[in-house]
């Protein structure tokens, strides 16, 4: 099929920043795009060929949107699965496949998948609701501390809580959940794998993620991770194995823990471009977004190696500010070598909302990390 400067139409479910960054590459290749998103202010609106406003969880809306395109992909996991299944049954190419998405959308099912395929992961137990978890704690079948995770609709750490005493469960929703063993980890790592339908498969280098201690959001992503080569090799091999077991097409971001004794445990996966791969726009031969596109269109995959060390700093709304956004000191950081801000185009800021990111590239990773901290301490996302 001819995708370039043709009538071919790629559909993207979700119009957020991941979609917007993917659209840079569809523009580069002159591939037509249609985007569906519930918000009138979706970041994708400025760069797609046609924008449709609608509910991503509504069967009819997603199904009808799918009927307008030749290949369908998504930039968010919270989409109507039944509509994707029906579209795929009717012959539409949907990548990643709804079969994979089904295994990933629910954290309990995802964890079972790892166990069934001998993929190392932290021990856990599934519960239908909070009440049944409490029964197990009172019966001493679950030991404190542990990590509570709701199985569906959690994101950026907001469906995750460390439970040290039973009162920590107060105010949690009575929904399906898992209780997971606390992992004493040295590092949180991630590997992005891309795979096309022909089976060509490549991994990006291992990255290291540093988290904001309170918000539980990634603050810095560092590529390459400053870890032993052997550990990095192990992490890449495990990520490849996970992608193959899912029979995945497109990008799969595999988040992992490096334990105190250098074991690798898979935490969770995301079947799409991922925050941990944003550095690749500036630092890699082929960005994660270009490779997602190549993968879902069954084109040869691009080189995933880095040209230079890259660090990403998330730009999230500062605490105490809500309203029309202003990026304080952005001109200042633009004056520094190797510093590139990305502004997602959300008009309103609120505390910890992801508003953009900044990439820092440098030949020397320690220097990049130093500049990243200066960036973090200089730019502020506030409101007028
Ligand atoms: P989300 O889907 O919201 O990103 P995660 O499962 O990735 O949720 O958990 C968010 C964060 O919580 C992780 O990045 C990690 O810092 C911490 N965390 C999650 N599971 C565990 C665990 N078993 N042990 C220790 N920390 C954990």
Image (tube, rainbow, N blue to C red):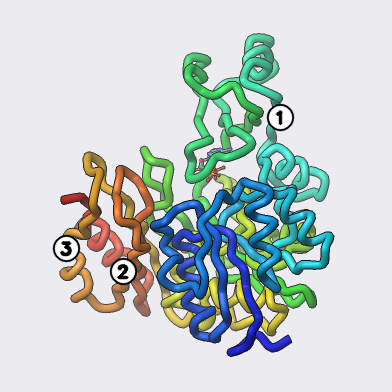
Residue highlighted by disc 1: 126
User: Alpha-carbon distance for marks 1 and 2?
Assistant: 41 Å
**Residue 36 at x, y percent in the picture:** 55, 60
For residue 114, above or below residue 145: below
Residue highlighted by disc 2: 341
In the picture, measured across the screen, residue 62 lies left or right of residue 156, that is right
Residue 30 in sight:
yes
Mark found first going from the N terminus, 3 or 1: 1
For residue 61, above or below residue 236: above
**Pointers 1 and 2 in contact (C-beta within 8 Å):** no
Residue 139 lies in quadrant: top right
For residue 288, above or below residue 5: above
Residue at disc 1, secondary structure? strand
User: Alpha-carbon distance for marks 2 and 3?
Assistant: 11 Å
Give the residue drawn at x 39%, y 66%. Answer: 311
In the picture, measured across the screen, residue 250 lies left or right of residue 171, that is right
Look at discs 1 and 2 and give the one toward the viewer.
2
Residue at disc 3, secondary structure? loop
Q: Which numbered dot is residue 329?
A: 3
**Pointers 3 and 1 in contact (C-beta within 8 Å):** no
Quadrant that contains the N terminus: bottom right
**Residue 106 at x, y percent in the picture:** 68, 41
**Residue 225 at x, y percent in the picture:** 49, 63
Give the residue drawn at x 53%, y 35%. Answer: 159
Query: Local crowd at mark 1 within 10 Å, few (<14), some, or many (≥20)?
Result: many
Residue at disc 2, secondary structure? strand
User: Alpha-carbon distance for marks 3 and 1?
Assistant: 47 Å
For residue 129, above or below residue 59: above
Mark found first going from the N terminus, 2 or 3: 3
In the picture, measured across the screen, residue 120 lies left or right of residue 217, that is right
């Amino acid at each position: 099929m001819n995708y370039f400067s043709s009538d071919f139409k790629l559909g993207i479910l979700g119009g957020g920043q991941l979609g917007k960054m993917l659209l840079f590459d569809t523009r580069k290749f002159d591939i037509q795009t249609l985007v569906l998103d519930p918000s009138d202010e979706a970041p994708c609106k400025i760069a797609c060929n046609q924008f449709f406003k609608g509910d991503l969880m509504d069967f009819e809306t997603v199904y009808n949107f799918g009927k307008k395109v030749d290949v369908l992909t998504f930039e968010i996991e919270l989409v109507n699965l039944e509509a994707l299944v029906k579209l795929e049954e009717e012959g539409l190419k949907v990548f990643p496949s709804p079969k994979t998405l089904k295994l990933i959308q629910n954290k309990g099912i995802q964890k079972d998948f790892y166990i069934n395929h001998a993929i190392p992961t932290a021990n856990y137990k599934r519960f239908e609701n909070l009440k049944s978890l409490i029964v197990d704690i009172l019966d001493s079948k679950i030991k404190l501390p542990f990590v509570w995770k709701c199985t569906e609709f959690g994101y950026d750490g907001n469906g995750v809580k460390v439970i040290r005493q039973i009162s920590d469960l107060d105010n949690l929703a009575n929904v399906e959940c898992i209780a997971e063993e606390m992992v004493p980890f040295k590092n949180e790592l991630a590997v992005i794998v891309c795979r096309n339908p022909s089976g060509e498969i490549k991994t990006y280098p291992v990255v290291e993620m540093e988290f904001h201690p309170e918000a539980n959001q990634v603050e810095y992503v560092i590529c390459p991770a400053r870890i032993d080569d052997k550990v990095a090799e192990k992490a890449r091999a495990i990520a490849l194995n996970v992608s193959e077991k899912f029979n995945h097409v497109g990008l799969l971001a595999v988040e992992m823990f490096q334990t105190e004794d250098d074991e690798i445990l898979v935490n969770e996966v995301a079947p799409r471009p991922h925050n941990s791969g944003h550095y690749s726009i500036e630092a890699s031969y082929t960005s994660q977004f270009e490779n997602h596109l190549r993968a879902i269109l069954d084109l040869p995959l691009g080189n995933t190696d880095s040209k230079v060390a890259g660090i990403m700093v998330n730009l999230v709304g500062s605490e105490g500010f809500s309203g029309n956004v202003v990026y304080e000191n952005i001109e200042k950081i633009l004056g520094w070598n190797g510093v590139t801000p990305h502004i997602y185009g959300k008009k309103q800021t609120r505390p910890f909302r992801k508003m953009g990111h900044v990439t820092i590239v440098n030949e020397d990773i320690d220097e990049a990390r130093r500049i990243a901290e200066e960036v973090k301490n200089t730019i502020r996302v506030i409101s007028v």
